[in-house]
Amino acid sequence: MNKKQISSVQLIPLSFLIAIVLGGLILMLPISSATGNWTNPLVAMFTSTTSTCVTGLVVVDTFSYFSLFGQFIIMCLIQIGGLGIITFISMIMLITQKKFSLVDRKMLQDSLNLNTDVGILRILIRISKDVLKVEFFGAFLYSIEFIPEFGILKGIWFSIFHSISAFCNAGIDIIGDNSLISYKSNPLVMCTTMILIIMGGLGYVVWFDMSEKIKAGIRKGFTPVQIFKRFNEHTKLVITVTAVLIVSGALFFFASEYDNTGTIGNLSLFDKIINSFFESVTLRTAGFCSFPQENMSDFSCVMSYMLMFIGGSPIGTAGGVKTVTIFLALLNVISYIHDDDQSIIFNRRITEENMRKATVIVSVATFTIIVLTLALIVTNPVSIQDGLYEVISASATVGLSRGLTSNLNTIGKIIIIIAMYLGRIGPISLAIFFAGRGHHKSKCRYTEGNYFVG
């Protein structure tokens, strides 16, 4: 089957699957492990999946189990998975000056979930440059802490790895076996990580719009409010929903965990605030943690379910059903209750197609999580709370765990692999499918049935 015979809906999930398999085969090799031994195929495939799907759940400690070569492969898989396979390949084609056919442009358009291929290569070049700038900036900030602590070479390597992992919302670290818990009182590491996570989760389209409008606003002497008003409607919605989720999540965690000595109870007031914001940010698909997740209160655990499920924003490195999607799905419900004939946000009407698409994506994601959670608790002796946390974390490509991942049996690990894979390609594939499918209009109309709903 040649490239022209494969649609975007087929190629994008297939490209992720190929990357996972190839990555798993490389990680199986003795050169990839610290001991020089062959790695168990399930461990290798699990690690390859969590890296490519930028999830962060691990069954072995990345820092101690894998060699420098193995860690480098994991970092490459994170970068490829975070940007998207098609986007990454297109970047290589640009660097090697390969020509883009119409099919190539269409694939790239679909992988970025854009409405048009006009200026697509210009957008790709800009994404490449901006990603490198942000990751370099993050690595520089990390190096201020890591080079004095680990030495020049190791400090630079740690800085680069964690900058890519944070920006791609992967949450995989190579510092130790407790993520960033050792740095919970280090504002530089915590804030750098949050900045990278948020930048990756906002989405490239938001970047471009903000960059252009802010530069123009500064030249013309506009106030921040005036600049915000000049953002396009998508940027305004993403920024608003993101800010509300981060602040509200931080407030809830601060209040519910304030006296919990297992999480932030023993920290200073400043560190409690920083860690509350960090938890609110990292739950939206990043996967780093500053305290053991199993120590959270039940209230915080439920809040975590919601934040993980929502995730980041469209056309970025984050997972989840996305901020705009969940907003439109809720708006669809509100519009029905109020019997509104149209939905208006920032003086722009939302199309009926987008409302339906958002509702379908949320519904399918919810159904998938329920099915996989039931499968996990049936095959493993785990509580519904821990099982649901694990599956939502995997499906939303978050990567946080309540100490469950490494204790799952073979079937449980396979279920999580499936959840991670579906979580990474599911929303993307659904969005492409519903955006690009043909409209099959029936030539006849049947008599309306008398059905009772509700």
Image (tube, rainbow, N blue to C red):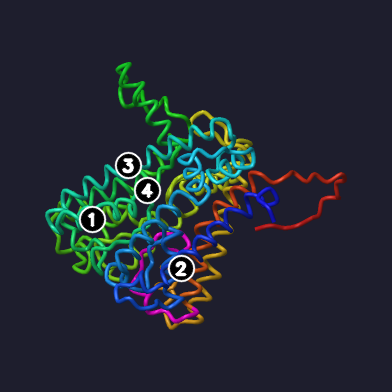
Q: Secondary structure at mark 1?
A: helix
**Label 1 vs 2, first from the N-terminus:** 2
Looking at the image, is mark 1 or mark 2 nearer the viewer?
2
Residues at discs 4 and 3 in contact (Cβ within 8 Å): no
Q: Is residue 206 above or below residue 225?
A: below
**Label 4 vs 1, first from the N-terminus:** 4
Looking at the image, is mark 4 or mark 1 nearer the viewer?
1
Q: Amino acid at mark 1?
A: Asn
Residue picked out by circle 4: 245
Q: Secondary structure at mark 2?
A: helix
- Tell me the CA gap for discs 1 and 3: 23 Å
Q: Secondary structure at mark 4?
A: helix
Residue picked out by circle 1: 275
Residue 263 horizontal side relative to residue 233, left or right: left
- Tell me the CA gap for discs 2 and 4: 35 Å
Q: Amino acid at mark 2?
A: Gly
Residues at discs 4 and 1 in contact (Cβ within 8 Å): no
Q: Is residue 79 above or below residue 123?
A: below
Residues at discs 3 and 2 in contact (Cβ within 8 Å): no
Q: Residue at x 34, y 24 (%)?
A: 215
Residue 214 has which mark?
none
Image spot of residue 414 (x, y percent): 50, 74
Quadrant where the image shows the N terminus: bottom right
Image spot of residue 213 (x, y percent): 39, 25
Image spot of residue 160 (x, y percent): 28, 52
Q: Is residue 41 above or below residue 286?
A: below
**Label 4 vs 3, first from the N-terminus:** 3
Q: Is residue 439 above or below residue 382?
A: above
- Tell me the CA gap for discs 4 and 1: 15 Å
Residue picked out by circle 2: 24
Residue picked out by circle 3: 134
Q: Which residues are magenta?
A: 390-411
